[in-house]
Structures are given as structure tokens and as C-alpha cells.
Image (cartoon, grey):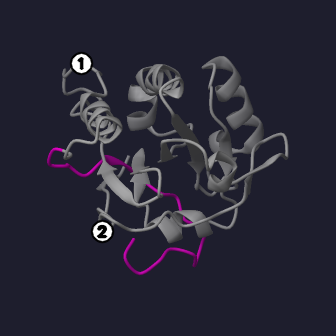
Amino acid sequence: MVARHSRMLPLGTIAPSFRLPDPGGRLWSPEDFSDARALLVAFLCNHCPYVQHILDGFVAFAGEYRGRGLAVLAVNPNDSSAYPDDAPEQMARVATAKNFSFPYLIDATQGTAKAYEAVCTPDFFLFDAERRLVYRGRFDASSPRNGIPITGEELRAALDALLAGRPLAPQHPSIGCSIKWKPGNAPEWA
């Protein structure tokens, strides 16, 4: 397990567009949720202990805020040939077992991870109604073996502030497993 911190893409960045399939082959893009008050692009995978640690809390968070205008797109950027636990059929299994209320997408070219400058899983990018980046960072301070409860308090605080039109609190980079880039595909900043 190689822990990495996220890059903290500049606030105000416009959400890069993408069109990615879920394991069933349906294509999804941020534009499918143009009426949502907020859009969260979450880089996740199946095998990372950091993702596994927060996954139940994140799924509950996504379900809770869905009714308040949040759209969530989860993107798996990992090289599934080197990490078979992240293969599409395993993604479908996890999404079903965990009752995902959001699409879980395959970034086979890793182009979406590059466009967002994602570095690790999990990595979260929250955009406002105009799709400007307002939050990038961690779910909360909990991580495997640190004993801090999983609450999602930092991402919750950011979303609550965004939905209420208040300024957002300081942000901390996410920490997680490095994205598993295909051979020769890692960007220089990774």
C-alpha cells in the first residue's frame, strides 16, 4: 500500500467533461446531471484499503445528499489488468453489494483521472451548480488504523456550506492508495 496525497486542483476549475461506461456498458457524463445543485466526482477503486475503510460511510453520505441536489459520479481509474480486483465485473459486484445509488464508471484510458489530476483513491472533487470546483480533498480525517470515526464531516461541511451559500472551510488533501497507472501512462506529476 503506497499512500499518496491528492494534488489539490485549483479552486474555481471548471469540471472536465468525460463520457465513461459503467460495468453494464451504459455511458455517463457530468452533463447527465446538469440540473443538480452540486456534482461530486469521486475517484474510487475496489482494492484500496483507504476506500474500503470509508466506503459504507461514503455510500450513506451519497444517498443522504441525493435528495438535496447532489449528483455523484464514482470513477475507477486503476489498471485492472494489473489489479484484477478493480476489473469491471468486480466493480459491478461491489456496487451491488454496497447498494451504490450512483454510477461507478470505468476510466479505461485513465484520461479522466489525468484531466482531474487525481493522484489517489479515494479522491473527491465537489463542483457547484456552474460546475466550478469548490472542494477537493478528503472525506474526513479517518483512515485505516488511526482510530478516528468515519463521519464524512469534512465533505459534509463543504457540501452543507455550498448548498447554504456560505463560504467553505479550509480543505485538507485526501490520502489513499496511488492510482495504478498503466505502464507508460502515468503523468509526470503522479
Q: Quadrant of residue 166?
A: top left
Q: Return the x and y of residue 8 as percentages of the image width and height.
A: 29, 62
Q: Determine the residue located farthest toward the left in the rendered image.
A: 170
- Disc nearest the viewer among 2 and 1: 2
Q: Nearer the viewer, residue 179 or 160?
A: 160
Nearer-N-terminus badge (2/1): 2
Q: Residue at x 58, y 55 (%)?
A: 78
Q: Return the x and y of residue 32 as percentages of the image width and height.
A: 69, 49
Q: Residue at x 59, y 49 (%)?
A: 76
Q: Is residue 84 visible?
A: no
Which stretch appears magenta?
169-190
| Residue placed under numbered mark 1 in the picture | 149
| Residue placed under numbered mark 2 in the picture | 10
Q: Amino acid at mark 2?
A: Pro
Q: Determine the residue located farthest toward the right in the rendered image.
A: 25
Q: Residue at x 52, y 70 (%)?
A: 115
The overriding secondary structure of the stretch rendered in magenta is loop
Q: Residue at x 71, y 60 (%)?
A: 19
Q: Amino acid at mark 1?
A: Pro
Indicate whether residue 56 is drawn in magenta. no
Q: Nearer the viewer, residue 83 or 95?
A: 95
Q: What is the spatial separation of the Cα atoms under label 2 and label 1, in whole angstroms?
A: 29 Å
User: Under tag 2, what secondary structure?
Assistant: loop
Q: Return the x and y of residue 93 as percentages of the image width and height.
A: 72, 27
Q: In which quadrant will I find the C terminus?
A: bottom left
